[in-house]
Amino acid sequence: MSEWYEEYKEKVSSAIRDERLQLALERATARFSMARKEAVASLPYIQWLRKRAREVKAWSIENLTQLISILKERAEELGCSFHLSEDSEELRKYVIKVCSEHEAQLIIKSKSMVTEEVDLNEALEREGFRVVETDLGEFIVQLRGERATHMVVPAIHVPKEEVAALFSKATGRRVSPNVEALALTARQLLRREFMSADVGITGANVIAAETGTIVILENEGNARFVSNVPPVHVCVAGIEKVVPTIDDAMAIVQLLPPNATGQLMACYVSLITGPSRTADIELTTTIGAHGPRELHLVLLDNGRSSMILDPNFKEAAYCIRCGACLNVCPVYGKVGGQVMGYRYVGGIGAIFTAFFHGVEKAAPVAFSCTGCGACVKVCPLEIDVPSMIEKLRQRLVSLGYAPPPHLKIAEYVESRQNPFGEPVKERISWLKELEEGGY
């Protein structure tokens, strides 16, 4: 079972030889790490906030079944449609059903890791729907036919010159590789899509069960268009995003931007509690004012319950997807997310991949981790990723997924008492020479 290893090794070698990729990764990860360091240093209460957020996540994960039940009740009271999907296929079928019932043609999306996890775009396109990503980074990788390479900045690996060539092709005119000009071009290309879409699909950074409130953080303003302009809003999120109250949600809202982008707060924080409504005529409430007339809240399990029930991996559910761990990972900094990941990238991504997509797809990333612990130091929830990676490796080895060089070293240690494969006598002789030489 070494095919996966050889294929991955080639991808790693190719990435390391790619000078433009190396430059892009070095610049971006260094910039984000410095911005995070400065932002965190400016918050004297950051340790209290980290402790508070971890307590919120820990309690929420322990009481998740109850929280989901409360959320369902509140959401339906607000006029939302609530659906809990056990797996990827069930989620895809539900969203396709909603889009079909509304005879949708154009679907716009804001950034959502869960929709990437379940390959929702591809499923919708197979059914004849046109799907447009509106986050600038997601829009770029969609035009390139690629996967996102970072939780926060999906196109971190694409230099501005390549973006300019991409936009020039899309517009039929030359677009300057000036960042401001590129952002303006994306604005022009996407504005007409916003205004003519039939369904908007978003993710959620956190969801408050008590009030049924969806919280979305962003900088570009595209998620507000996606969640507000189309007549139907579908919010897709993992079950681990649910917390008890808005106050609990705010602990995560405060912690996320400094660790993700180095901002003290995101440009936009949307709190969405049910579909739009008005009571301005005779104090009679009616659903559907200027915003969507329908809101579908779709939660996804897809292996999360198994991960949470496993004491070795439960902590992974605390992750708030800030991406800080990626920016300090020495392996990610050399190969990027196109190589070091499946749908989720980096060390924490290996854990998600094992439970959401199968351990065999997690093997390459799991054996790439150096165990240096840099991710633990910057993680706002102090998630011990290296320990979980070590336990995942043990499972992979038991299933036959181990890098051939690792197996060879184990064989040498057992048969020749050293990892280099040297005959025992030669090894002893070499060690004696070192000793006699005073080393």
Image (tube, rainbow, N blue to C red):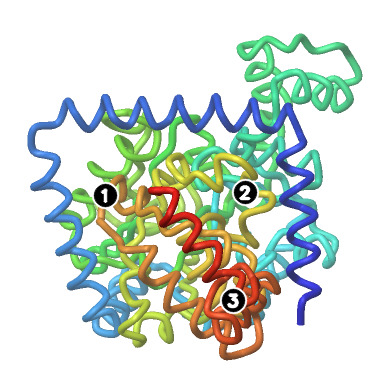
Q: Say if 126 sits above or below 266 in the image.
A: below
Residue 162 rendering spot, x and y as whole percentages: 78, 24
Question: What percent of the width, then of the height, locates residue 50?
Answer: 17, 50
Between the C-alphas of marks 2 and 3, the distance is 45 Å
Comparing marks 2 and 3, which lies closer to the viewer?
Answer: 3
Is 96 placed above or below 73 here? above
Q: What x and y, as percent, mark residue 98?
A: 64, 69
- The kind of residue tagged 2 is Gly
Residue ID for mark 2: 337
- Of residue 173 and residue 234, the one placed in the foreground of this image is 173
Label 1: which residue? 380
Where does the N terminus fall, quadrant-wise?
bottom right
Q: Which of 285 and 146 is in front in this view?
A: 146
Left-right relation of 222 to 210 = right
Foreground: disc 3 or disc 1? 3
Q: Earlier in the sequence, mark 2 or mark 3?
A: 2
In the rendered structure, which disc, 3 or 1, sits on the residue that comes first in sequence?
Answer: 1
> For mark 3, what is the residue?
425
Residue 147, relative to residue 423: is it above or below? above
Instruction: Determine the residue positioned at 59% across, 33% down.
Output: 25
Amino acid type for the residue under numbered disc 3: Lys
Amino acid under label 1?
Pro
